[in-house]
Image: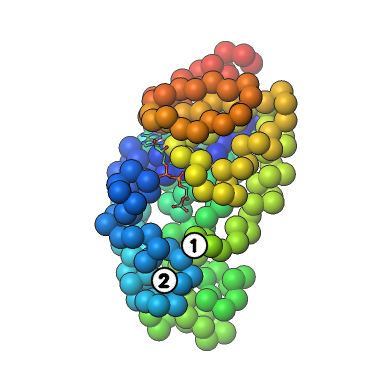
Amino acid sequence: MKKVLVLTGAGISAESGLKTFRDSDGLWENYNVYDVATPQAWTKNPALVQEFYNKRRQQCATAKPNNGHLALADLEKDFEVQIITQNVDDLHEKAGSSNILHLHGELTKARSSKDEKLIYDVRDKEIKMGDLCEKGSQLRPHIVWFGEMVPNIEIAQEMMHEADYLFIIGTSLNVYPAAGLVHFVPAHCQTFLIDPNDCPAGNISNLTILKEGAGTGVPKAIKIIREKV
Ligand code: APR
């Protein structure tokens, strides 16, 4: 089976009602990202950070996957599909995709603030100040904040080497190292960029741009590659 690598960003979840990051004057759901999504914010005001992610977790619990997520899950009938997502929501999981690598963490999990290997499922529950890991340290959201290492980046780079097709969906390609992944595909790989707005495609070769939302753009890209099988 041919292999489809899929790099998703906030835009794929926009039609599910979750806001993207860079379309509202630098604010994310009315918060300045540097007040809620950095290690410095956690040191300065952990309660605010918890509150912010508790709200995001709640919002995510009621969100439903849209046609874009569902089409990618269905694609597994004919292709080997590996999703690499920058999103912290679980809409790819809810849609039924099997192979999902989260680069920036997951809202449905908490982790120890002292030992990053201690990770716990919290699903849609709040994390409160005073909730501790088994070693007695405060639990924090299992999120990769600005300025933190991206532990899954190397495995993602390896995955890219195997792509026959790459779908880039709903990401402004602004945030590194995730944005750099698009350059790890082999020369024969055909890339589709699906985004309703102009997006810096840089020097990606063998590129097809579908300037539309994920709900219609993803099925179109899929139709093109299915016709080649
Ligand atoms: N379908 C597809 N794409 C869309 C849609 C849609 N319906 N609506 C908007 N978009 C596009 C926007 O045009 C934009 O290019 O989605 C992209 C969203 O870009 P960002 O908000 O920058 O999100 P993303 O690229 O995922 O951000 C990367 O930055 O804030 C951090 O860690 C966070 O993972 C995030 C990372």
Q: Is residue 191 left or right of residue 28?
A: right
- Check the image and report above or below for 95 versus 52: above
- Report the front residue among 185 and 117: 185
Disc 1/disc 2 C-alpha distance (Å): 10 Å
- What residue occupies the far left of the structure in this picture? 30
Say which quadrant the C terminus sits in: top right
Say which quadrant the N terminus sits in: top right
Residue that mark 1 sits on: 145
Residue at (39% x, 42% y) in the render = 13
- Check the image and report above or below for 141 versus 100: below
Q: Secondary structure at mark 2?
A: helix
* Res. 116 image quadrant: bottom right
- What residue occupies the far bottom of the structure in this picture? 136
Mark 2 Cα shell of 10 Å, populated few (<14), some (14-19), many (≥20): some
Residue 37 location, x and y as percent? 43, 63
Q: Secondary structure at mark 1?
A: loop
Q: Is residue 163 left or right of residue 211?
A: right
Residue 139 location, x and y as percent? 47, 76
- Looking at the image, tell me whether mark 1 or mark 2 is earlier in sequence order: 2
Quadrant of the picture in which ligand 1 is shown = top left
* Mark sitting on residue 41: 2
